[in-house]
Amino acid sequence: MVARVIPVETFDLVIFGGTGDLARRKILPGLFRRFLAGQMPADSRIIGAARSALDADGYRAMIADAIEEFGGDEKTNKKGVADFIARLDYVPIDAKGEGGWKALAELVRTDVVQAFYFSVGPSLFGDLAERLHKHKISTSDSRIVVEKPFGRDLESAQALNATLAEHFNESQIYRIDHYLGKETVQNLMAVRFGNVLFEPLWNNHYVDHIQITVAETVGVAGRGAYYDKSGAMRDMVQNHLMQLLCLIAMEPPSKFDADAVRDEKLKVIRALEPIEPHHIVRGQYEAGPDGPSYREDAENPRSFTESYIAMKTHIANWRWSGVPFYLRTGKRLKARASEITVVFRTNGHSIFEGEKDQQQNVLSIHLQPNEGMDLQVTIKEPGPGGMRLVSVPLDMTFADALGDQDVEVTDAYERLIMDVIRGNQTLFMRGDEVEAAWAWTDPLIDGWEARNDVPKLYDAGSSGPEDSLMLLHRDGRKWREIKG
Ligand code: NAD
């Protein structure tokens, strides 16, 4: 089965910050793959706009190099690369001044789909929005894409929303969270809402608890100064983990459209209970054979910022009352692994002699390094020797199940950019969602700052601080092993 490619309308995509790290590493290699897949109409254009004094040829050469460095197997398609970069144009621009805006206005067409990707720091969002409007480049149909971080607390997120709202409607704003673009995240919704099998069990009668883990092996070296002002809570939990939590916990939307889905996600965030201080464990990695300590990386010997956080939270509604949600994320852990696990209850009575402990069914949704799902089920151990039971994973990884090498695993960025061109906001965060997430996060951060909470140290290459293991141990549970 070859993946279906649905062409999009002709577009002009302007990438502000088109020479930056994100544009070179993710956005343009992703667009290149969409181009090769035949999804980009022949007269569509991509226009880089950034501070560097380049001309169009200079930009094309830069992006050809970026594809060489960051592209996948497709980069060997030299003709493809040449045809793709021929679509590129470039305008040197100053977001904070007038330079370049006239040239951009002359270049961008108003009779095709227009998208403006703000791949720059949030301090420039307001300047870009204002100048796009002032120079009559954007129209009431234009779309803007904004990157994380969307604020650092409720107040700054509200200010950013207000700034963007001066020139764009909510239906034009695409707040990106690339976790939502992952194939498996969407597959999670298909599994939940496309089958009758899971939904009846998806509640506090049958679910014992849920774990969400986003573990990284890298530290913060190279961006320590930035990270030290943020920490794991702001950098990962408020956005990525919260979005995963919403998708796993939300009620079935009445239809799979942007507002129906986002309304349900918002209800989950608003139903999150405040967390008791002793249900939060913050940590910092120590120096290890592979690198310095967090404080050295952050160049702040007295930093109290967390490079690791684990927490237990509850959702106060009928479906989830009493079911703990354990979340954790951290740097310099033993493996790079992101996973959601739904651990089901047992019924407490085993009919099998000598098999008193029933194994729990566990649905695991793997987001990285490999995307896929499996369901742990109990079967009879094959062979003679009586009724011995064994727990085995039922592999639900779609590429294997569909039995074809051609099933295309689209990268999150390329999928999300094509959704912008199509005008589909389902996988983007709405302003009120982001604000609700900060409204829940802020008091927790204020709480540990007021208590002068000192993060617990953990060994680089470990599973995090000892106290985070205790968080579950106290409840008679344990974290899933972090496996890459
Ligand atoms: P970067 O520093 O590598 O690039 C910044 C870009 O902005 C450059 O193209 C630069 O020319 C342009 N720029 C800066 N000031 C400008 C001005 N006054 N006028 C016009 N252009 C200007 O940054 P990046 O890593 O590409 O990140 C861009 C945005 O994406 C940031 O908000 C970042 O937080 C976010 N982000 C980045 C990543 C990543 O992996 N790099 C991941 C998630 C989010």
Image (tube, grey):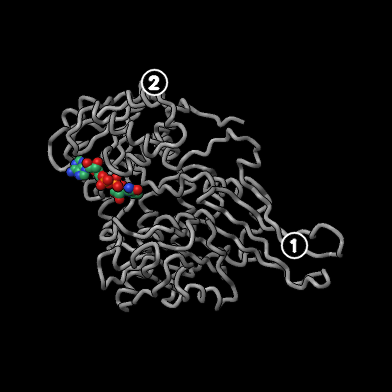
Which x, y percent locates residue 302? 26, 73
In this rendered view, identify the residue nearer to me: 388 or 292.
292
Q: Which mark is residue 317?
A: none
Task: Evaluate whether residue 458 shows in this view.
Answer: yes
Asked if the beta carbon under badge 2 is closer than 8 A to the nearest atom of ligand 1, the reply is no
Position of the N terminus by quadrant: top right
- Image quadrant of ligand 1? top left
Q: Which mark is residue 390?
A: 1
Does 327 appear above or below 4?
below
In this rendered view, identify the residue nearer to me: 76 or 475.
76
Name the amino acid type tagged 2. Answer: Ala
Q: Residue furthest left?
A: 98
Does 104 appear above or below 264?
above
Which x, y percent locates residue 4? 55, 30
Does 424 appear above or below 375?
above
Number of numbered discs: 2
Label 2, label 1: how many angstroms apart (C-alpha)?
A: 56 Å
Task: Evaluate whether residue 130 shows in this view.
Answer: no
Query: Badge 2 is on which residue?
Result: 42
Mark 2 or 1: the one toward you: 1
Which x, y percent locates residue 131? 19, 38
Quarter residue 102 falls in: top left
Left or right of residue 418, residue 155 in this image? left
- Disc 2: CA contacts within 10 A as few (<14), some (14-19) or many (>=20): few
Name the amino acid type tagged 1. Answer: Val
In this rendered view, identify the residue nearer to me: 352 or 387.
387
Q: Residue drawn at (66%, 42%), measured in percent from left and top? A: 401
Left or right of residue 453, residue 468 in this image? right
Q: Which secondary structure, mark 2?
A: loop
N-terminal label among 2 and 1: 2
Q: Residue drawn at (38%, 46%), measured in percent from left and top? A: 176
Quarter residue 393 falls in: bottom right
